[in-house]
Amino acid sequence: MLGWKKVQSKRKTRNKTRLGFIVLGFIASLIVFSQIFNFTKTLLSPWRISAAQRNYSWNGQFNINLLFRSKGIALVSYNPTDQKIVVVDVPDQTYLSTSGGFGDWQLRSLFGLGGDKLLKDTLSQFFGQPIDGFLDFSGPYKSKSAKEIIDLIKSSPTGPINILSHLKTDLTLMELVRLKLGLGAVRFDKLTQIDLENTNALTKDHLLDGTEILTADPNILDTVLVDLSDPKLKNEHKTIALFNATDKPLFAQKWARLITNIGGYVIITSNAKNKVDKTIVAGEKSDTLKRLQQIFNYTCSSANCDKILATDEDIATSRGQINIKLAPDLP
């Protein structure tokens, strides 16, 4: 009888020990899973600043246009297809019509006026180019130009790690890693630097109080920045129709400029017969369609897109392979 109790006691002890190991293993798995989840979330989340969320993550397929804020403001465009970088330095005294109805201001005032979003929206309008991200440098990098920072990223294996502690950006860590690898692969002779002050795109002028400003001619500016077009879009040569479904005058022409500048082929700009609340981007599946849906922050399932193509009066009668109805949700 005592032997049987001893056996039962040992069995219970073993079961408890086994249960303890199972519980510990489960807890350890939860910890590991949570760490992996947090790490993945970190890779896919903006690095250290909150900004207007994009509905896409840059995967290296298309050009990426970034604003660098360091010693000055610069547009940095990386072309992964041709492995090229273009750096466009914009003088602080450039006089700009701001997005969002804030009036006309010099570039140096924009960040303090409305942060990175106002800066991105306004310079997107100024350049006629989409702005995909914002990088704000501090510490020792605040006194460096965009070109100097790119040189550090390209030449130093530890440079990006040091820069991260002095960087605020709406890019994710995954995007930053792709950017580092892409920039690092560009040959020195494939990097072009343009100082707009030294081009004929800007003209000196003065405000009523005597303040010197620089104003831009958009037509000349577009010719100066012709290298910013995306080869993928140019090579596809998809026909694009734009319909203004707002009460804003010349709205289709404004967006036609941007689409043309990135390499798109706009054949129609017209007023829409029917208004919509949210911008629609639909048409033939292609890299051009994918990029335009990114730019206009538009998502659409295949079935829904097919329905729009068939039922929307403007789009159904269009001759464009890709059709965009511009709604008031756009800046």
Image (spheres, rainbow, N blue to C red):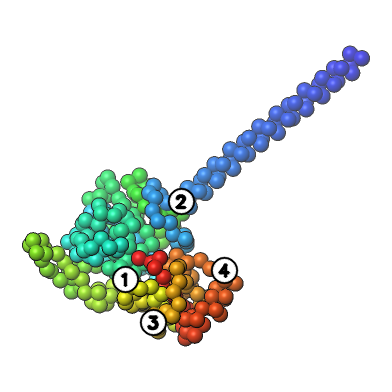
Q: Which sits earlier in the primary sequence, circle 3 or circle 2?
A: 2
The residue under the point 36% across, 52% down is 169
| Residue that label 4 marks | 301
| Residue that label 2 marks | 45
> Does any portion of residue 69 appear in the rendered image?
yes
Query: From what the image shows, is residue 44 above or below residue 22?
Result: below
Cα gap from disc 3 to disc 2, whole angstroms: 38 Å
Query: Which quadrant of the figure has residue 98?
Result: bottom left
The local crowd at label 2, few if under 14, some if 14 to 19, many if 20 or more residues have their Cα within 10 Å, is: some
Q: Which of pointers 4 and 3 indicates the residue nearer the eye? A: 3
Badge number at residue 164: none
Q: Which sits earlier in the primary sequence, circle 2 or circle 4?
A: 2
Answer left or right for 83 relative to 208: right
| Residue that label 3 marks | 270
Q: Which sits earlier in the primary sequence, circle 4 or circle 3?
A: 3
Answer left or right for 199 relative to 7: left
The residue under the point 50% across, 81% down is 313
Secondary structure category for the residue under label 1: loop
